C-alpha cells in the first residue's frame, strides 16, 4: 500500500480551513489557525475577513507570518490599527469566529495556555499565557480549536482555564457573564473533528479522519469523547491542496517540510 500524499498536519489544516465560511470574519491565532484561514481565503472563502491581534484587519496574506505581529499580516489590509480596536470588534459582537490552539483541553472545550502543575508559584511547565486567547474565546460569536491530541493534553480538568469553552456545562458561560450562544464549535485533531452536544456541551466525534480506527479516539484522551452511532468521514486533502499549503508556508513553519 502506497504512502498518502499528505501528512496529518496537512489534513488538519485543510479540514480546519473548510470550516471557515465565506463572508465571515475570523480572529486568527498563530500557526495552524493562520494557515487554515489563509487557505480558506485562497480557495472557497475569498471574502473571509482576517483579523489579527496586533492590529491588521482584512489582509490577503501571501506567506505564513511568524506571529500575529509580523508585518506580513498587513499585506493588502483594509486597515492596520491597534490591538485595542481589534479586541473591541469582538466585544461589540462583530467577530464571527475565533481560531485558537492550546496546551490542554477538557471535555467542555476549555483551553489552558497558562501553566501546568499543581502549584502556581512553582509550575511543572510555564506556558506563554493568554495573549488574546481569553478575549477571542470569550467574545467571538463562536470559535474553533486546532490541537494535537494525546492523553496528556486531552485532560479531565485543565490546570487553568485561560480561554473558556463551555466551562462546567450547559448555562455556565452565560452564568459567568459571557455572551449568550458563544463557545467552541469544533475541535480539529490528527484523529478527527469533534463537536459539542447542544444539551450537555460534551465533546463528541463528528468526523473520523482517513486511516484512523474509531478506537483510537478515546485511546488518546483522558476523558471520554462521546462516539455517536453515526459520524462522518473526513475527506482527504487533494494533491492541489497540499501544493497550496506548501506555497503558503514555504519554510514549513506550521506544516513541516
Image (tube, rainbow, N blue to C red):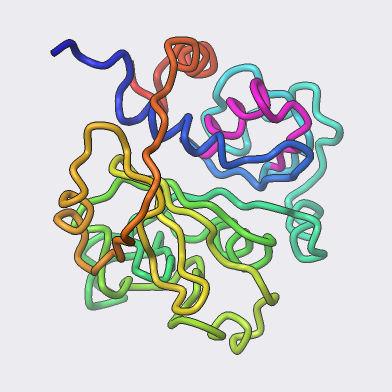
Quarter of the image holding residue 39? top right
- 131 vs 242, left or right, is right
Magenta-highlighted residues: 33-51
Assess whether residue 248 is covered by the magenta stretch.
Answer: no
**Residue situated furthest bottom in the rendering:** 175
- 23 vs 9, left or right, is right
Assess whether residue 37 is covered by the magenta stretch.
Answer: yes
**Residue situated furthest front in the rendering:** 229
Residue 252 x/y as whole percent = 40, 19
**Residue closer to the observer: 77 or 37:** 37
Residue 46 x/y as whole percent = 74, 26
- Residue located at (73% from left, 36% from top): 22
- Residue located at (30% from left, 23% from top): 7
Residue 107 x/y as whole percent = 35, 69
* Total labels drawn: 0
**Residue closer to the observer: 107 or 124:** 107
| Relative to 134, residue 45 above or below | above
Quarter of the image holding residue 226? bottom left
Q: Quadrant of the C terminus?
A: top left
- Residue located at (35% from left, 62% from top): 105
- Residue located at (58% from left, 18% from top): 63
Residue 234 x/y as whole percent = 39, 36
- 19 vs 196, left or right, is right
Amino acid at each position: 500500500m502506497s504512502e498518502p500524499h499528505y501528512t496529518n498536519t496537512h489534513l488538519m489544516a485543510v479540514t480546519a480551513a473548510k470550516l471557515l465560511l465565506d463572508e465571515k470574519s475570523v480572529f486568527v491565532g498563530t500557526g495552524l489557525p493562520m494557515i487554515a484561514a489563509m487557505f480558506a481565503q485562497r480557495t472557497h472563502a475569498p471574502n473571509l475577513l482576517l483579523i489579527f491581534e496586533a492590529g491588521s484587519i482584512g489582509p490577503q496574506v501571501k506567506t505564513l507570518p511568524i506571529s500575529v505581529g509580523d508585518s506580513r499580516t498587513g499585506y493588502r489590509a483594509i486597515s492596520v490599527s491597534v490591538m485595542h480596536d481589534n479586541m473591541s470588534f469582538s466585544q461589540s459582537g462583530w467577530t464571527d469566529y475565533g481560531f485558537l490552539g492550546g496546551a490542554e483541553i477538557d471535555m467542555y472545550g476549555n483551553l489552558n495556555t497558562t501553566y501546568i502543575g499543581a502549584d502556581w508559584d512553582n509550575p511543572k511547565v510555564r506556558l506563554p499565557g493568554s495573549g488574546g486567547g481569553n478575549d477571542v474565546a470569550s467574545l467571538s460569536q463562536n470559535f474553533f480549536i486546532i490541537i494535537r491530541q494525546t492523553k496528556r493534553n486531552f485532560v479531565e480538568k485543565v490546570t487553568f482555564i485561560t480561554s473558556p469553552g463551555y466551562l462546567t456545562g450547559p448555562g455556565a458561560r452565560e452564568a459567568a457573564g459571557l455572551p449568550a450562544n458563544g463557545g467552541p464549535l469544533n475541535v480539529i485533531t490528527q484523529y478527527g473533528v469533534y463537536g459539542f452536544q447542544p444539551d450537555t456541551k460534551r465533546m463528541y466525534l463528528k468526523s473520523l479522519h482517513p486511516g484512523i480506527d474509531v478506537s483510537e479516539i478515546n485511546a488518546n484522551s483522558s476523558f471520554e469523547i462521546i462516539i455517536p452511532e453515526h459520524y462522518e468521514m473526513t475527506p482527504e486533502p487533494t494533491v492541489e491542496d497540499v501544493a497550496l499549503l506548501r506555497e503558503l508556508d514555504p519554510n514549513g513553519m506550521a506544516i513541516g517540510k
